[in-house]
Image (cartoon, rainbow, N blue to C red):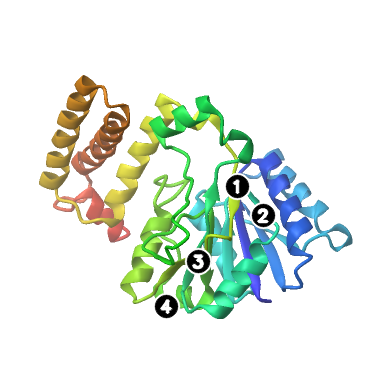
Amino acid sequence: MEFSIIIPTVGRCDSLERLLHGISEHFGQRGIKHEVLVVNNAPPGELSERISRIAATFQIAGRAPVRVINEARPGKCMALNLGIGQASGQVLAFFDDDVQVTSEWLAIAAEFFRAKSFDAMQGPILIPSELQGNEEFMRALNRYRTIHFVKYPSSMSEIKTLTGANMAIRRAVFERVGLFDERLGPGQAGMSEDVEFAQRLLASGGKIGYEPNAEVYHEVDWSRLTEEYFRLRHEQQGRSRLLFKQRSLLSILSNFLRSMISFAWYSIKGHERKKYRAKGRYFHYRAMLREKMKPTLASGIEPGQRIRQGL
C-alpha cells in the first residue's frame, strides 16, 4: 500500500461525506495504491453510528478502500495516532474532515515523494472559489484569521512548519520522532499539534517541503469568524503552546503587558489588523498566565512541568 489517508472526525458528517466522495471520485482513477482510514472520534451513540454508516457507503461496490476505526478517547491526536498505528502505507496523508480534495492531489503527492527527499509535504489550503470575491467574508477573515488558509509563494520549496488539514508524512518519520502529542489539538488543549510535531521533525534533521499543486479547499464555518471564537481560539493557542514551550512567568507577564499596550495604541490609531493581532496576543498570553498561576497539588512543581512529566 503506497498511501494511507487518515481522516479524524468527530461529527461533521455532511463534510465528511463530501470529502469521501471527492476521494472516491478522484483518487481511484490514478492507479496509485491507497487506503482511507476514517478515525471515528465521536462518543458512542447516534453520531458515531452515522459516521460509520457514511463510511460504509463508500465500501460498497469498491467505491473506495475505506476503513472505519473507532477511538473513544476524546482528542484529535488520539485519533491520529490510532490511525498511524493501523495504516499500511509508506506515506501517510492527513486531511481534516472539512476540506475538499482536488482531482490531481494523489498523483501530485506521489510524484513529490518519489522525486524529492523531503520528510513531509505541506499542500495549500485554499478559500472556496465561491467566497474568494465575497467582500463580507474577506473583511471577516482579515479581521479574525481564525480559519487556517495556507498559500505560500509557488517559488518556495522548503518551509518550517505544518498545517494539519492538508499534509503528508513519510512513515519513517514517526519511527524517528514519535507520534503526535496527545495533550494538544482539538479535544484536548485545543491547538498546535501540527506545529509541535513539525518542530520535532526539524530538530531531528528532517525537512518539510511545500508542494503548491497539492491543493485542497477548506469549507467555511461562519461561526469561526466571530469575536467569541476569536477569543476562544487564541486562548486555546496560549494553553497549547505553554505545554511544549519553555516560558517563564516573567516572559509571559512581559508579553501580556506588551500586548495590552499594543492593543490600546492600535485601537487609538484605528489600525484594525494590528489591533486584532495585539488583541489575539492579549488573549494568548492571558490564558498562558492563568495556566501558569494555577495552584498545583504537587508542591514545588509548576503546572507546565506536571504536564510535561506526565504526572
Query: Callout 3, which amino acid?
Result: Met
Residue in front for this viewpoint, 157 or 300: 157
Q: CA distance from mark 3 to mark 2?
A: 16 Å
Q: In this rendering, is residue 111 above or below 160?
A: below
Which residue is label 3 attached to? 121
Residue in front for this viewpoint, 171 or 263: 263
Which residue is label 2 attached to? 102
The residue depicted at 23 percent of the width and 56 percent of the height is 305
* Left or right relative to 300: residue 242: right
Q: CA distance from mark 3 to mark 4?
A: 17 Å
Please, what secondary structure does the residue beneath circle 1 have?
strand
Q: Is residue 122 visible?
A: yes
Please, what secondary structure does the residue beneath circle 4 have?
helix
Q: In this rendering, is residue 234 above or below 113?
A: above
Which residue is label 4 attached to? 176
The residue depicted at 30 percent of the width and 43 percent of the height is 238
Label 3 close to label 2 by CB (< 8 Å): no
